[in-house]
Image (cartoon, rainbow, N blue to C red):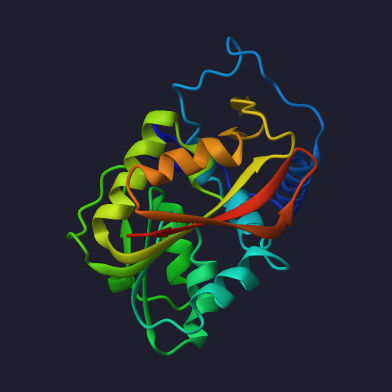
């Protein structure tokens, strides 16, 4: 399905790019959410968008004034091998290259995203196409790992597997920025442009605490009208 999508997808005109960008921005600030389980099936993760060239353009912009600054502060005094979980277009990897003591790797499920990362000067040897729920990395291969705005888009079963995987290949600390519900309630699986969980801090804390001995929760500057960003600092 993914290969067919990529082969038949026509080249984007600038009008098409601006149209989709407006659509995504509307999604990020929209007050309309779908909570009907019959319309939003939490057993099915939306994937096709990760092969969309216009979405890749949007991913290169959205974290400029918030999470990209925050991950730099988190890792600024660190050294060693670091893994970007679901790295997308590699924009965060590129930003972190200013720290010479960090050896940064990344993976994503989409070949399109990985190809975009290589255009940013990131070596192919540092990148891999992989499903985050089942990677081929060795145990304790990385000193640190992080994800930004990714885990909420997995199914609940997928979330469990991704967190387990992160604890397996991470030697010390793993950092995850996730939107949590403003209401403090578990709003469940929401379907707009992308499907995702908009749940409470406590819901996410319990997920991480299964695999990490200590979990700290730190506010992020990122927010929209139904969610607020939180960093989950997970210590082995």
Q: Position of residue 41 (x, y in %)?
A: 52, 18
| Quarter holding residue 104 | bottom left
Residue lying at the far bottom in this picture: please name it: 100
Name the residue at 37% across, 30% down: 157
Q: Is residue 68 left or right of residue 209?
A: right
Who is closer to the viewer here, 59 or 147? 147
Who is closer to the viewer here, 101 or 41? 101
Name the residue at 76% across, 38% down: 226
- Count the labels in the image: 0
Q: Quadrant of the N terminus?
A: top left
Q: Is residue 200 left or right of residue 15?
A: left
Q: Quadrant of the C terminus?
A: bottom left
Q: Is residue 130 left or right of residue 138?
A: right
Q: Position of residue 71 (x, y in %)?
A: 56, 70
Residue lying at the far top in this picture: please name it: 38
Name the residue at 59% across, 42% down: 201
Residue 131 in sight here: no
Name the residue at 79% across, 45% down: 22
- Relative to 191, does residue 141 appear above or below in the rendering? below
- Relative to 40, does residue 199 appear above or below in the rendering? below
Residue 69 in sight here: yes
Residue lying at the far front in this picture: please name it: 214
Q: Is residue 38 left or right of residue 93?
A: right
Q: Position of residue 235 (x, y in %)?
A: 38, 61
Who is closer to the viewer here, 22 or 229? 229
């Amino acid at each position: 399905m993914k290969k067919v999508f990529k082969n038949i997808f026509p080249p984007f005109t600038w009008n098409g790019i601006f149209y989709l960008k407006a659509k995504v921005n509307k999604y990020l600030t929209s007050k309309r959410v779908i909570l009907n389980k019959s319309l939003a099936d939490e057993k099915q993760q939306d994937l096709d968008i990760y092969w969309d060239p216009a979405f890749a353009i949007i991913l290169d912009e959205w974290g400029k004034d918030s999470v990209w600054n925050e991950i730099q502060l988190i890792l600024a005094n660190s050294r060693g091998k670091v893994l970007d979980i679901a790295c997308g277009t590699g924009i965060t990897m590129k930003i972190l290259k200013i720290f010479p003591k960090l050896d940064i790797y990344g993976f994503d499920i989409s070949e399109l995203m990985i190809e975009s990362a290589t255009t940013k000067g990131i070596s192919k040897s540092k990148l891999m196409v992989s499903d985050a729920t089942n990677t081929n990395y060795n145990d304790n291969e990385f000193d640190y790992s992080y994800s930004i705005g990714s885990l909420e888009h997995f199914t609940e079963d997928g979330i469990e597997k991704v967190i387990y995987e992160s604890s397996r290949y991470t030697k010390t600390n793993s950092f995850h920025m996730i939107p949590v519900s403003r209401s403090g309630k578990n709003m469940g699986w929401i379907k707009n442009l992308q499907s995702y969980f908009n749940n409470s801090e406590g819901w996410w804390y319990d997920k991480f605490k299964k695999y990490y001995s200590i979990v700290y929760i730190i506010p992020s500057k990122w927010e929209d009208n139904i969610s607020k960003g939180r960093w989950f600092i997970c210590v082995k």
